[in-house]
Image (cartoon, coloured by chain):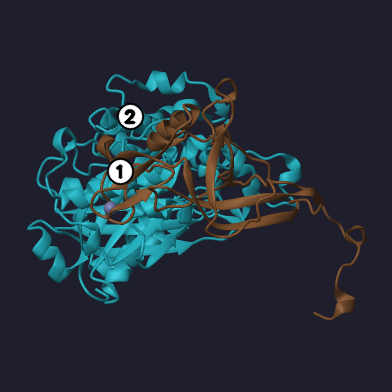
Amino acid sequence: MPLKERISHIDEVRSWQGSIRLEGVYTAGVAGERWLRGLQEGRIYGTRCPRCRYTYVPARLFCERCFGHLDEATWVEVGPQGTLTSWTRVHVALDGQRLSPPRCIGLVRLDGADALLVHDLLEDGTPLRVGLRVEAVFRPPAERVGSIRDLAYFRPVP
Amino acid sequence: MAGRRVAIVGAGMTKFVRRALETGPELAWEAASKALESCEMTLDQVDAVVLGSAPDAFDGVHMKVEYLSPGAGAWGKPTIRGYVGGGTGVFAAIQGWYHIASGMFDTALVVCEEKMSSCHPHPQAAFNYIFDHTTERPLGPNLLWIFALEMNAYMTKYGLTKRDIALVAVKNKRNAAAHPAAQLGDPNITVEDVLNSEVLAWPVQRLDVSPVTDGAVAVVMAADHVARRVTNRPVWVEGVGWSLDTQYWTNRDLSYPTYVEEAARKAYAMAGIREPRKEIHIVEPYDPFDYKELHHLEGLLLADRGKAAELVALGIANRDGAMPVTPSGGLLGVGNPIAAAGLMKVAELFWQLRGEAGPRQVPGQPKRGLAQAWGDLMQVGTVIILGI
Ligand SMILES: [Zn+2]
């Protein structure tokens, strides 16, 4: 389309404003229910598939690789320490505003896990690098509600 | 018949409930693993996955089939999403058929899931965005408008009463009482219960409508040579058809579903059926509303126009009648997790034709059945014919 045919001012044509507004209420699921209860207790669980030898974090009800049921016997505690697999420093928010200070996000392989967990990463002056040892820091017990936010952030192991 | 012969060899489903604790992937996994167990197959014997789910908005996850894929066994496999709105459940089985009939794959796992309870407070909210943004949405429309206008037009054209139509809801909810996965089975429901239920948009009342449901259904499909190895009772796909009417719902014949007739004629031709009323032994037409079952029976050419209600009134459509209609209990009785509801009808034919439907079993060893669904913007007809 030639440039001059484009609509540069929406009020030059008839238009209506509309938004798609939907509310969602999500259940955590069979495995998620128990996994979040674990976080509330300050523990991070995974489920380890005995056939595939793969440990899912967050814990899953089934193994997507072999389709086996990951039952009670497959629940294992992982972490709380792990290894930083990648990290980023985010300078722009969703709405385009500059973030000051920037926010740091880490991808962590908890000890004993195969799957990675993404969460906030505390910057304490330690130079960030892939391979850095990090540990989970939980909110104080009284503030925990059974949410991914009960885990406050990861920080470099002192 | 086009392509290779294809059979359904296994089926499984979750309970249909108003709000499941399970996540969408957990529901899908339960149905899919039950379907594989039913034919003693494992995931590594599955060549391809077909995943059906209706609007993303219900589960509240954008691109939800990608989200559901772990539970459908899609990890590391060729996977496709089937999507024609409410017609998806039957269409997903059609997609499973052509994946295999084409010679591309020997087996396919077909999984349909819907978690409508995530959409809060009611999935009705998601439907507000299907209307034209310029000429309809400013009027504040409600999906029920379409059904109420359609039902009224249908009743008026053929002189049908509310009671004639309510009999469908009674039959299906009673049938569902024998279904172990049913949400709304009721062996004691009466026509008065339906006629006295809350008016939603005249002439549509609460019990004329199927419920909001969470659930999942799966079937395993296989090429001839694999199917015969897996089971001695394969249920063959004999015919399929699908067709789309105009997007403008205001431009359709509100008293007759032409798109269903077009889909049915394709399926009958493929199955070599000339006299469907004699050659189809069980019908599972799409019944999100009671009048729609009648509408669809006429579109399927299984009743004369305006005469489907007589099949119900005379008991011909009962489970032990001459042409059992919706012996499962349907969407009105088993429940309506959109895409999963259509595939539930396909699974019902699988169980009925194998004689495995237990207390729901249609007598007389039926040999051939038809399942149909309806969807997109109320304009698509999808039909599958299964036989043994
Ligand atoms: Zn596994």
**Seen in the image, is B364 located left or right of residue B186?**
left
Looking at the rendered structure, the kind of residue marked 2 is Lys
Picture coordinates of residue B87, whole percent (x, y): 43, 53
Which amino acid type corresponds to the residue marked 1 in the rendered image? Answer: Glu
Residue B15 rendering spot, x and y as whole percentages: 31, 35
Is the same chain shared between marks 1 and 2?
A: yes
- Name the residue tied to disc 1: B30
Colour applied to chain A: brown
Query: Would you call the spot at circle 2 few (<14 residues within 10 Å), some (14-19), or many (20 or more)?
Result: many
Q: Is residue A9 above or below residue A139?
A: below
Can you tell which mark lies on residue B173? 2
Tell me which residue sits at (56%, 55%) in the image: B252
Which residue is depicted at the point 21% across and 64% down?
A: B222
* Crowdedness near tag 1: few (<14), some (14–19) or many (≥20) residues, C-alpha within 10 Å: many
Residue farthest to the front, as pictured: A158
Q: Which chain is cyan?
A: B
Q: Residue at x 63, y 38 (%)?
A: B142
Q: Would you say A81 lies left or right of A77 here?
A: right
Q: Is the CB atom of the residue marked by disc 1 within 8 angstroms of ligand 1's nearest atom?
A: no
Viewer-proximal residue, B227 or B150?
B227
Per the image, label 2 sits on a secondary structure element best described as: helix
